[in-house]
């Protein structure tokens, strides 16, 4: 029998509405479920549906609509003495909050983690970051309630030379990249990204890294330089990982040997990737996402498997230094260390790994730097 005016209102009608509401308010599945514990109780078969039960049901619908910023038809709470009648707007209201379930009326202030490198930048620099929840459900609740993650880069405190200025401009142009439940994309900045995937939300990610964003410098002679953000989930989707790479593959704008004339195309200063998380505002429902634990690294790609034309140079404080070219299309000749040489030494704490399992080096922990000499 239908739930309409003139028909008998059954406990089954109420329980059907209850199930639809709890699928959003409670644990739910996939991208439905806010993880709230105050779910609506069922009415036993043949039992009377009390006014208080309807009041609870309507309250949960109202809370979700307010949380989302959804517009629904107002329904007056019934009292025990009221004449029983069908709420004509009830089904439509539930359909509205179901359709808008990933919307949020407001978020809390962003929690930001900065990952910095102050080593002179040449070649490839990779920043990794991991947001981890205590469980997959808590990650779901974070995104289902409107939570989002973000990442952006910056270069500050650098010498005002041609290449450093171009890098600062590129990072500003790249803006921020945001990740929500079912969507993603660039926010702010300028220019035209090579890749700006708007369909790499949390539920679109897998355990394999995917390139979600890439943008190149727009000013000659450094148009070969670019930034690239990659994303994946780990720990049965209880965590999200980002691997953000800055690639300095443009030829330098000078013919000087920069081991002697360190005057142009040097990228010093603070290289920073900022990683953010924003939870939903808790005015209308509690925070069920729990604590987000973060971890990450910042360093230069320095794996011997990425290098060719390797020649030994000096030994500095027990470290063998080399000269080499990269095999991944990065132009120029570089000096520095081989990451594998650090294994089992006092400098092993400078070793990191990137998204593909290659070694990186944090040169701020070494007595030498990685320098592009021509």
Image (spheres, rainbow, N blue to C red):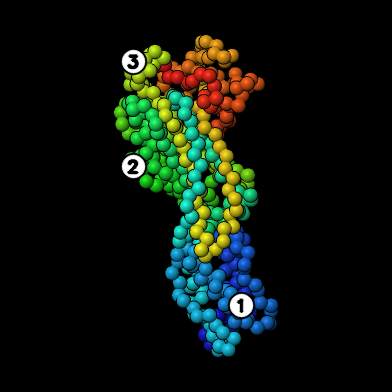
List x then y, in percent, for residue 111: 50, 48
Task: Say if 349 sits above or below 231 in the image.
Answer: above
Instruction: Please rate how many residues cluster around mark 3, counting C-alpha atoms within 10 Å: few if below 14, some from 14 to 19, many from 20.
Output: few
Residue plotted at (65% across, 21% down) = 344
Which quarter of the rendering shows the C terminus?
top left
- Tag 3 and tag 1, C-beta contact below 8 Å: no
Among the two numbered marks 3 and 1 on one chain, the one whose residue lies closer to the N terminus: 1
Residue plotted at (52% across, 32% down) = 298
In the picture, the disc for residue 190 is 2
Among the two numbered marks 1 and 2 on one chain, the one whose residue lies closer to the N terminus: 1
List x then y, in percent, for residue 349: 60, 26
List x then y, in percent, for residue 190: 33, 42
Q: CA distance from mark 3 to mark 2?
A: 31 Å
In the picture, the disc for residue 317 is none
| SS at badge 3 | loop
Which quarter of the rendering shows the N terminus?
bottom right
| SS at badge 1 | helix
Q: Residue furthest front?
A: 157
Task: Say if 204 sits above or below 352 in the image.
Answer: below
Quadrant in the rendering for residue 266: top left
Residue plotted at (52% across, 25% down) = 364
Among the two numbered marks 3 and 2 on one chain, the one whose residue lies closer to the N terminus: 2
Drawn side of residue 49 relative to residue 361, left or right = right
In the picture, the disc for residue 53 is 1
Q: CA distance from mark 1 to mark 2?
A: 53 Å
Is residue 153 visible to the viewer in this orientation of the structure?
yes
Q: CA distance from mark 3 to mark 1?
A: 80 Å
Instruction: Please rate how many residues cluster around mark 1, counting C-alpha atoms within 10 Å: few if below 14, some from 14 to 19, many from 20.
Output: some
| SS at badge 2 | loop
Foreground residue, 228 or 63? 63
In the picture, the disc for residue 255 is 3
Drawn side of residue 112 relative to residue 344, left or right = left
């Amino acid at each position: 029998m239908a739930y309409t005016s003139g028909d008998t209102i059954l406990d089954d009608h109420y329980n059907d509405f209850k199930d639809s509401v709890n699928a959003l308010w409670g644990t739910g599945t996939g991208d439905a479920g806010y993880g709230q514990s105050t779910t609506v109780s069922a009415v036993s078969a043949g039992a009377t549906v009390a006014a208080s039960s309807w009041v609870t049901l309507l309250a949960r619908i109202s809370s979700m609509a307010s949380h989302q910023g959804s517009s629904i038809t107002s329904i007056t709470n019934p009292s025990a003495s009221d004449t029983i009648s069908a709420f004509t707007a009830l089904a439509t209201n539930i359909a509205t909050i179901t359709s808008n379930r990933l919307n949020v009326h407001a978020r809390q202030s962003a929690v930001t983690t900065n990952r910095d490198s102050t080593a002179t930048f040449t070649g490839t620099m990779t920043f990794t970051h991991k947001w981890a929840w205590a469980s997959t459900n808590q990650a779901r609740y974070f995104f289902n309630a409107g939570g989002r993650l973000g990442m952006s880069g910056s270069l500050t405190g650098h010498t005002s030379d041609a290449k450093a200025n171009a890098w600062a401009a590129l990072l500003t142009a790249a803006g921020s990249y945001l990740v929500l439940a079912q969507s993603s994309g660039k926010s702010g900045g300028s220019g035209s990204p090579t890749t700006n995937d708007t369909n790499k939300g949390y539920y679109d990610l897998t355990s394999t890294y995917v390139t979600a964003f890439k943008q190149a410098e727009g000013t000659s002679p450094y148009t070969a330089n670019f930034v690239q953000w990659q994303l994946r989930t780990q720990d049965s989707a209880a965590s999200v990982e980002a691997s953000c790479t800055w690639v300095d593959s443009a030829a330098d704008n000078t013919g000087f040997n920069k081991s002697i004339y360190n005057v142009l195309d040097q990228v010093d200063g603070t290289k920073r990737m900022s990683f953010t998380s924003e939870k939903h505002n808790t005015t209308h429902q509690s925070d069920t996402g729990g604590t987000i634990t973060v971890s990450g690294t910042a360093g230069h790609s320095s794996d011997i498997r990425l290098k060719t034309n390797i020649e030994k140079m000096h030994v500095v404080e027990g470290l063998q230094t080399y000269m080499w070219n990269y095999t991944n299309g990065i132009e120029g000749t570089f000096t520095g260390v081989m990451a594998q040489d650090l294994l089992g030494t006092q400098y092993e704490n400078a070793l990191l790994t990137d998204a593909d399992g290659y070694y990186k080096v944090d040169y701020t922990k070494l007595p030498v730097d990685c320098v592009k000499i021509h």
